[in-house]
Image: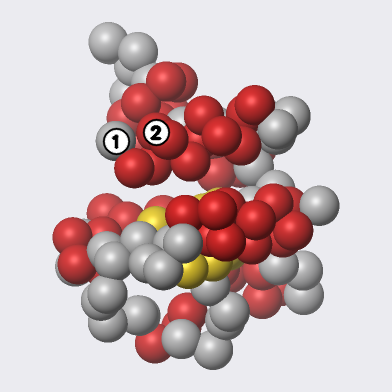
């Protein structure tokens, strides 16, 4: 529900987003669809929670875009902290959009990064 809210708020502000829940249909190959979404996206928002930082699948997704960032020297991965958790080492040096204290402040951080 939290990620859906952020996605909806970003879309209302004119941002075009690929969101797995909305884009992958019954019968689609999940890995192929996600790879296509990653390939076509300029950025990836990594929502950091206890569940996501412990998910191998989430790690594979963001590290794919992180390698692209390293090679292009352009920001591709935007960490978004939605609950207190251990931030992965590769992301720990990046400033994250923080939703813990204020939803609006976190959303504004994302909007600034996407501009």
> Could you tell me how far apart the alpha carbons at marks 1 and 2 are, in whole angstroms?
5 Å
Which residue is depicted at the point 32% across and 56% down?
58
Q: Which residue is mark 2?
A: 4
From the viewer's perspective, is 99 left or right of 55?
A: right
Which picture quadrant has residue 40?
top right
Pinpoint residue 74: horizontal percent, then vertical percent.
77, 69
Which picture quadrant has residue 77?
bottom right
* Frontmost residue, 69 versus 92: 92
Pinpoint residue 64: horizontal percent, then vertical percent.
50, 60
Q: Secondary structure at mark 2?
A: helix
From the viewer's perspective, is 54 left or right of 28?
A: left
From the viewer's perspective, is 103 left or right of 66?
A: left
**Can you see residue 14?**
yes
Which picture quadrant has residue 12?
top right
So how many labels did they put on this image? 2
Q: Residues within 10 Å of mark 1 (few under 14, many from 20)?
A: few
User: Disc number at residue 1?
Assistant: 1
Q: Secondary structure at mark 1?
A: loop
Pinpoint residue 75: horizontal percent, then vertical percent.
71, 67
Q: Residues within 10 Å of mark 2 (few under 14, many from 20)?
A: few
Name the colour scheme: secondary structure
Pinpoint residue 14: horizontal percent, then vertical percent.
74, 29
Q: Contact, CB < 8 Å: mark 1 with mark 2?
A: yes
From the viewer's perspective, is 100 left or right of 110?
A: left
The answer to whether residue 115 is above or below residue 39 is below
User: Disc number at residue 40?
Assistant: none
Which residue is depicted at the point 37% across and 67% down?
100
Which residue is depicted at the point 39% across and 33% down?
4
* Outermost residue to the right: 115
**Can you see residue 35?**
no
| Quadrant (top left/top right/bottom left/bottom right) for the N terminus | top left
């Amino acid at each position: 529900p939290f990620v859906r809210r952020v996605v909806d708020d970003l879309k209302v502000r004119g941002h075009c987003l690929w969101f797995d829940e909305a884009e992958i249909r019954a019968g689609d190959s999940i890995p192929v669809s996600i790879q296509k979404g990653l390939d076509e996206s300029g950025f990836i928002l990594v929502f950091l929670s206890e569940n996501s930082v412990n998910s191998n699948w989430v790690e594979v997704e963001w590290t794919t875009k992180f390698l692209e960032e390293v090679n292009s020297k352009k920001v591709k991965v935007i960490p978004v902290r939605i609950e207190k958790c251990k931030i992965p080492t590769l992301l720990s040096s990046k400033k994250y959009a923080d939703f813990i204290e204020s939803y609006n402040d976190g959303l504004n951080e994302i909007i600034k990064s996407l501009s």
